[in-house]
Amino acid sequence: MSGTLYVVPTPIGNLEDITLRALRILKECDLIACEDTRQSLKLLSYFKLPKHLISFYSYNGQHRIKGLIDKLLNGKKIALISDAGTPAISDPGYSLIKEVISKNINLEVLPGSSAVVTALVGSGLPTAGFIFCGFLKRKSSKIRKELVGLTNLEKTIIFYESPYRILKTIEMCLDIFGQDAQICLARGMIKKFEEFIRGTIKEVLESIENRKSLLG
């Protein structure tokens, strides 16, 4: 009889946001596949949980999958977590989940923290329909092509971006969507320096372009 893969969301900023069910699963499982063992140890140590960890991130994910599948087929219970939020959203957890489903291994996905939904609700932008694009491409030409392809959608568009590229990306949005389009930058979600910067693209651009730095 196969084991179970538990997809366990972790807090995105405040450790108190973890659920009682998540704590129970993390305590009972045989192994925790995590993005960064150092980051996960902080969570496990805070709640005094067992520390049976194995790293599972973008650079070793494909290499790890076979071993994790073998353990699951041998009846082990494995929890999949990321550094923050719900696993498999813009991280290699997707590949593991896909393989688990193809092998008819038990899969349980727990509800919990999600930076995407938290940012959307706090943005003040329409929530009836939205599209999440993950991380934008790295090259400016590819970013532009991706953004242009989104111009006719009557939905809120959500994407992740590095603070080191955010200014240039917002400038590109200004050129593509126009200065009066509404935008919100959400950073440091649920942390001490959480910030929502709301307004038209022109207003938000003016707000951040004179800052020495924009972290998070």
Image (tube, rainbow, N blue to C red):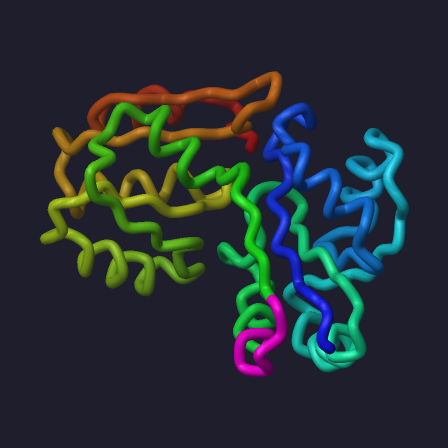
Camera-side residue: 123 or 204? 123
Give the left or right position of residue 95, taking residue 124 as reference: right
Query: Which of the image's four quarters has the N terminus?
Result: bottom right
Give the left or right position of residue 128, taking residue 6 as reference: left
Q: Is residue 24 magenta?
A: no
Most distant residue in the top direction: 192
Q: Position of residue 111 (x, y in %)?
A: 52, 43
Camera-side residue: 135 or 115? 115
Most distant residue in the front direction: 1
Residue that appears at 32% across and 58% down: 143
Residue that appears at 32% across and 29% down: 184
Quadrant in the picture for residue 49: top right
Quadrant in the picture for residue 197: top left
In this rendering, the count of numbered labels is 0
Quadrant in the picture for residue 100: bottom right
Up the image or down, 9 lies above or below 67; here it is above
Give the left or right position of residue 57, taking residue 151 as reference: right
Up the image or down, 141 lies above or below 26; here it is below
Residue that appears at 35% across and 20% down: 207
Q: Position of residue 75 (x, y in %)?
A: 78, 72
Q: Position of residue 15 (x, y in %)?
A: 69, 27
Up the image or down, 108 lies above or below 83; here it is below
Residue that appears at 65% across and 50% down: 82
Give, as a single range, the part of the protein colored magenta.
100-106
Give the left or right position of residue 8, taking residue 60 as reference: left
Camera-side residue: 134 or 1? 1
Query: Which of the image's four quarters has the C terminus?
Result: top right
Camera-side residue: 189 or 161? 189
